[in-house]
Image (tube, rainbow, N blue to C red):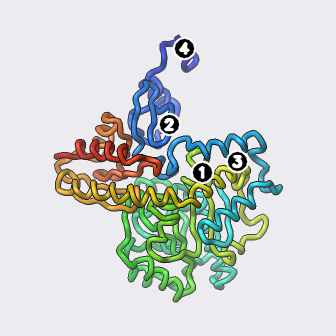
Amino acid sequence: MTTFAGRETAAPTAASFIELDERWSTHNYHPLPVVLAEGSGASVTDVEGRSYLDFLSGYSALNFGHRHPDLIAAAVAQLGRVTLTSRAFHHDQLGLFCRELAALTGTELVLPMNSGAEAVESAVKLARKWAHRVKGVPDGTAEIIVAGSNFHGRTTTIVSFSTDETARADFGPFTPGFVTVKYGDAAALRDAINPRTAAVLLEPVQGEAGVIVPPEGYFADVRQACDSHGVLLIADEIQSGLARTGTVLALDHEGVRADVYTLGKALGGGILPVSAVVGRRDVLGVLKPGEHGSTFGGNPLACAVGRAVVKLLKTGEFQQRSAELGAHLHTRLTALIGHGLSEVRGRGLWAGIDIAPGGPEGRAASEALAARGVLCKETHERTLRVAPPLVITREELDRGIDAIAEVIRP
């Protein structure tokens, strides 16, 4: 017997934990009926001892797998020293973290925050202030161009420019100042620029939309349009960055540099929320004391873990693994087109796969994969996102792909 939920009972089952969640937690997610208790590398184990391959990686927060020893060691060491000072004081990890992250990303200044949504909100504020102070746009009139089917977070301002009605419905009134154009249409974006335009905010690969890769040359055209009109280019690399696509930043595939990048998810090593806005000094430098901040942003524990993440990425090992294993992933998935899949998209160890008509819908496919020991999740009705940790072995990857082939077979 054991104590569970305040009473003596038999060892708790997955069903008992799910019952607790359903009773006490807000139903803003629809998780698969799996209750995880442990994780290591690319594998997780549930409360009843069943093992699974993780093919989602916490939406890229677990790029380095579960409990990477270097990241755990960095966290434990810092936990024994100091975890929080607030930015009212300096501490011995912040400057080192910012310098090392700037060097990794080829940028000049770093604004550390916590969640990805906070990073995007910060980038929006920076773009508006820069437009007013530097470009001369009248205060309160700046506009930011975004793409349809975007996903940048779930705060009120961010859902104001979402085109997903599930994310928007009943949350108005919405924040003005955003103009939406079709993703991948450089001509439409150029036509939307006007003297009030402060920035263009885009994902190098649209994750929530189904891992949508833009047409070749799109970002080069966007960069040229921004340069021609004195507009900032902001790249949201929260899901796509930090080796997920085979390069440090997904925009590197396009041979284009953004003025500002938002980073998150993998920057916290799957241990705690860590995000950052990185970019040009003349843009981030518009912020003065008191104009923006965060109690936990850039805290010592976050910086110590973030530094360990940067150290892993400096070796190039994870970028190489993503590129090589990603090529294998896409070759195998592409072979399933006409055999249960209708389309495969993506870069590196990241793919969006559309299940062909006649096959299961996304939710049913996710549940069938879980029954076969592979954890994946649908986005929209007939699309699965495949994003295993970058530490996955080729054999584990093949095992997961084999399970997908079984599940989507008409």
| Tag 3 secondary structure | helix
Which label belongs to residue 39?
Answer: 2
* Amino acid at dot 2: Gly
Query: Residue, x 69% and y 62% (percent of image)?
Result: 98
| Tag 2 secondary structure | strand
Do tag 4 and tag 1 residues touch (Cβ < 8 Å)? Answer: no
| Earlier residue among tags 2 and 3 | 2
Q: Disc 1 marks which residue?
A: 268
| Tag 4 secondary structure | strand
Q: What's the CA distance linking mark 2 and mark 3?
A: 21 Å
Q: Disc 3 marks which residue?
A: 301
Q: Residues within 10 Å of mark 4 (few under 14, many from 20)?
A: few
| Earlier residue among tags 4 and 3 | 4
| Earlier residue among tags 4 and 1 | 4
* Amino acid at dot 1: Gly
Q: In the rendered image, is residue 172 in sight?
A: no
Query: Residue, x 46% and y 80% (percent of image)?
Result: 222
Do tag 4 and tag 2 residues touch (Cβ < 8 Å)? Answer: no
Q: Nearer the viewer, mark 4 or mark 1?
A: 1
Residue farthest to the bottom, as pictured = 228
Q: Disc 4 marks which residue?
A: 2
Q: What's the CA distance linking mark 4 and mark 3?
A: 34 Å
Total number of numbered discs in the rendering: 4
Query: Residue, x 37% and y 43% (percent of image)?
Result: 396
Residue 140: x and y in percent read: 63, 75
Residue 210: x and y in percent read: 36, 58
Q: What's the CA distance linking mark 3 and mark 1?
A: 10 Å
Q: What's the CA distance linking mark 1 and mark 2?
A: 16 Å
Front one among 408 and 391: 391
